[in-house]
Each structure stands twice: as C-alpha cells, then as structure tokens.
Amino acid sequence: MSQIQIEDVLNCPSLPSLPAVAAKLIELTGDPDVQISEIAKTVQQDQALAGKVLKTVNSSYYGLANRCGSIDRAIGYLGLNTVKSLVLGFSLVDMTSNTDHDGFDMIGHWRRTLMGATASRSLAERFGLSDKDEVFTAALFQDMGMLAIFTAIRGEYIEATRNIEHGDVSPVETTSFGFTHAAVGAGLARKWSLPENIADAIAHHHDPEGTKGGDIEMIRAVSLGTQVAEALSVQEPNTAMRRIERQTATWFPNQKIDMPGLFEEVNKSAKELASLFNTEIGDLKDVQLLMNQAQERGLEHQISMQRQTESLEKQAFTDGLTEIPNRKEFDNKIEIAYNEHMEQGTGFAVLFFDADKFKSVNDTHGHAVGDVVLIEMASRATASVGDQGVVCRYGGEEFGVILPGYTVLKAAILAERIRADIFETPFDIRQCDDGPDELNISVSIGVSAVDAGPADRLTKPEQMVSEADAGVYAAKEAGRNNVQVWSPQVVEAAGVPIQNPSTNAPKIPEGDGTIKHILLVEDDALAATLMMTLLSRSSDADVRWVQDGNQAREYLQRTVERGDRPCDLVVCDLGLPGCSGIDVFAEYKKLGLAGKIPFYILSGSDNEEMPSDVGLEGITGYISKADFAKNIGKWVKVFTQPSVAAAAA
C-alpha cells in the first residue's frame, strides 16, 4: 500500500487551482441577495470565458428560440445555475489543459466526463428533479479526484488502475492508497468552496446510499449518469444496461428509461459539448450497433440461463451415476400412472429388479467396479424397455420400471427380456484398473400390474411398489436370476413362474418376549446418545446404533440371511441419510419381520395424519419427536417392557 495520504494529494503544489473568475462566481452565487448584473460583470471580466459561455448558450444544446447576446440575458433566459455550470465547466477544462498528463488517458477521461454530465442532466430533466444544472456541474467534477491523484503520484496511480473498468476503480484505490478519487474530488470541491450538495454528490457518485444528508435524488442522478457513460464505453454493455434498469427501478420507481433514446441523446450532446469545450473525446460508439450487441448478449444470457435451469431441473430428476431418472422421478411417474388409472381406467405395470449378490461385487472388486456394473445395468434395461416405459434408479442397486398401459402378461414377458439381456452377456469391466476383464451379472425381478389382482385392491401407488418389491424378494428366495410376478393366479402363457411372494417369508428364531437387543437408527448423534443412555439405564438391553438408512437395511438383510434374529425392537428415525425410515421398514417387512419384531418410527414431522398412515403400513407405532421429548420416561418404559414385543406379535 502506498504511504501517501489524502491530505498529501489535496495539498500537492502541482495541482491546478480554480480560476479567479470561477472562484468569485462561486462566492457571489452563495449570497442570496446578489444582483444578476454583478454576476454578469464578474463573468465578463474574462472576455474569452464569457464568449465561450455565450457560444454554448446559443448552441443547439440549449435550443434557445432567440439568440442571446449578453451574460445577464443568458442568466435571465436559462437561470443562474446554468451559467454557473458553464463557467465552472470551462474553468475545469482550462485548469487541466496545461497540466502534464503523460500516461493518463485524458481523452477517455473527458469522454466519460462529458457523457456522464450530459446523461446526468438529461436524467434529472426526465425525472423532474429540482435543478438539472447543479446535477450537470456535479457530474462534470465527479472524477476530478482521479486527475488529482495522478498529478500527485503519477506512475503509481497508473500502475494500480491499469486495465480496471471505471466502475471497479474505487475498491482498487482503497486497497492501494486507503482513499478513493471520489473522496479526493469532494475534498477539492470543498477546498474550492463549491456548494456542499455538489461536493456531497462527488463524494458519493459511486455510493449514493452512503450519503448522510446530501440531496439523494441529485446523487442518484449523477450515479446513473456515470453508469450510462460506462455502458457507452465498455466492450460488454448489456451488464451495465441491466444495472441501470435495476437501479432506476429502485431509486425512481415511477420512471422508466428509454435506453436507446437516452444513449442517442447522450452521444449527440457529448460530441457537441466536446466541440464547444474544445476537448478531444475520441470516437463514440454507434448506439444502434451497441443496442444490437446488448440485445444479442441479452438473448445469449437468456438462453444460457434457460439451459442452466433445464440442466438443474434435469439434475434434480436424474441419477448422477447412471444418468437415468432417479427415485424422485420414479415417484412422479408412478403417481401419474396411478392417477390415470383411477380417472380413466387405464392399466399400468411396475417392475422392480436389483443385482444379485451386488454387495460381493463391491467387497471383492471395489466400488469403482460396482459403479460400472450399475451403469451397464441401467443401460441394458433402458435399451430393453425402449420407449415403452421409463427405467429409474430407485436406490443403491435397485431399479424400478414403470410401464403405462401394460398388462401383467406383457410386463412379465418384458421382465424376462430384461433379465436375459443383463445375464446372457458378461459385463465389460476393463475400464477399471484393478478389476477383472468381465463379470457375469444377474438380476432378480419382481412384477406387479393393475390386472395382477382385483383392481379395487389398489388405494395408492405405493401398493404397486410393495407388490413388485415383494416379487424381487420371492425371486431371491427362488434362487435369484429369475422373474416373479405378484398375482393370486398363474399366467402360464408368460413362460414365467408366478406365485404370491407373501407365502415365502423367511424363518427367523422366535423371541422370548424380552427386549435384549435394540436397533436404533438415528442420524442425530446427540439424540442417539441420549436415547442409548436412557435405554441402557432402564434395562439390560444392548443397543446397536446406526446412522444411515442403507446401513440399517444391510444389517437386517445380513442377519436374516444368516438365519439370526436381528433384534428385539427397532426404533427408526423417519428422515435419514441413505434412505428414509419408511424404506428401512419396507426392507424389514420384505424380510418377514413385520409382526414379529416391534418397529417404531420417530419423526420431527408435524403431520397429524402421519400416525394413521404409518399404522396402515403395519408399523407398530409412530412417535413424534416432540412427544418423545416431553414424555421420555414413558416411551423408554414402553420400549423396554417385555409386553411390547408380545403386543406387536
């Protein structure tokens, strides 16, 4: 950071001083009783300055109907502030014209200054502000601080602000020097005794809301004028134009800017003023071309945003690994199919399948190989189904297929095709460094359809999911790599063995009515610790705590597959990572544990209908966390009493 202080800049001996006529004019206009003739006499003391003022007054910029031949008449026609603004403007040009500005972009400075001043004046007039010429003066002087800092430290200032857009200069100045050109400009304005409202507008032209007592509308007009000059100068104007529109809507809510019209007016006025002020501002951009570019950029931005929105929407309903629809989309699609069935009587079918012994694939070859297997499974199933339905990744190695308009027979035939397409050709795993070249993968598939049983059995779409999932379990029990259809009848023409999977419940050891082992599924560590402590104090039960829904499902699967009793009581949170408590219960029910081991759901939900809904699914009980917190002793006692298991059975 430079060691220079703002006082060093303001007191720099090489800074130009305000011409005597301008200084005297400021002093006179501060006196409310001053005579116009005295002001005119002061201006006319500098004949060259008076001539420039009259030439400007009579130009098309002001559009007077009658030619004005004297300063006092100019004051009468246009007002004191108009003449004062011109005197100060010409004085500003004169006081900086003889200074060495080698290395400073003086052409760019004056182009931005004159465009900003004319834009600010035009906006003040359009918005009906009290004095457009005071706004014009403030805009003319707003960047005087940049010239002052350059004069004081030259190369250091150029190096710090090189290739920085004007709108981004202030933060760079603050970081490099500890002050901004706006603060320096306001300091000079006060040093030269400019009106305080002008000094305040200079100080806050990049931060209008930072003023604590200035003319806020005047400052906002100057700030908007500065942004118009920036939009007419930068390579990508659409961002600046959108900012102008947003700021106008916020600061002047009843006003709307005709951007092309304003830009044309500013370009024309800036060129004319540059000629009158005898100042070079370089070539100005073609407004029509600028607006076309902005329109193109705006359209590109709109298209880009639309694509981003579509991409995000797709991501929300697409599985990240397999790039097929996810569980959320499955739920949406089955809801649609079920509603069409209820309203129009149309049939539909649901397939569920998962990879046989998939856990051993991950354990033996690693998750990278497992991911390749899942991707290929999704690809083959999608190819088999084609446009007849939608294949979704339901979760883990489980996939669901929704088939609108399908009968149970047609669905069973398609299920067999999927099974064969996955099993008959080994999976190519050569892309994985540490895996085998290929793997043989099989799937177990469950099928359900509206016509697989009495149609009136269906009261919600989740029943179809449960039926298809039960078919998967039956296929596992039947030796894996086969299709099982939920149905009270056999559809022989399908060539697929069909049975009611509810008759295939696994055999697990019976409990003795005591609670010896509790499975606690809870992702909140604090809540789990509290519950384990209370349960341990109230009984001799061993508490197994898992935090993830999928971990709970796997534990239940492993113990039942071994022929062991997994626990004597399950207490499961509803909202879990991995999968929900309802999904854990679905696995528990699929394993044949329902009615044999109590299963309680804990939830923070305030949904009063939830308990009855959960009860209909066969869960032993539903406990809101609020009720549990209020009656911890009661619920711990319920959990640890032997009668709980007996009642559940």
Image: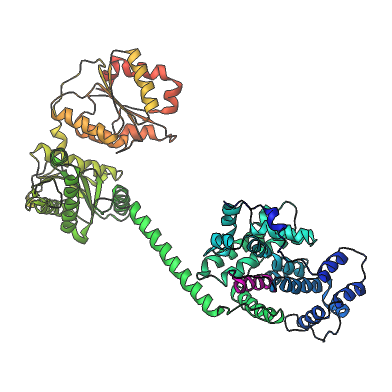
**Residue 46, quarter of the rendered image:** bottom right
User: Horizontally, is 311 left or right of 592 in the view?
Assistant: right
* Residue 370 makes an appearance in the image: yes
Q: Is 249 left or right of 73, judged from the image as shown?
A: left
Looking at the picture, tell me which residue is in the foreground, 517 or 510: 517
Q: Nearer the viewer, residue 384 or 312?
A: 312
Q: Residue at x 55, y 59 (%)?
A: 160
Q: Is residue 216 visible?
A: no
Q: Position of residue 306 (x, y in %)?
A: 41, 63
Residue 377 picture location, percent across and down: 16, 51
Residue at 28% from the left image edge and 37% from the top image edge? 583
On the picture, is 203 further left or further right than 439?
right
Residue 107, magenta (yes or no): yes
Q: Quadrant of residue 513?
A: top left
Q: Residue at x 50, y 69 (%)?
A: 236
In the foreground, 238 or 102: 102
Residue most toward the front?
Answer: 13
In the rendered view, tell whether residue 640 sits above or below residue 365: above
**Residue 119 lies within the magenta run:** no
In the rendered view, tell whether residue 23 sits above or below residue 491. below
Residue 358, image x and y in percent?
15, 41
Q: Quadrant of residue 561?
A: top left
From what the image shows, is residue 423 above or below residue 271?
A: above
Q: Quadrant of the C terminus?
A: top left
- Bounds of the magenta segment: 98-118
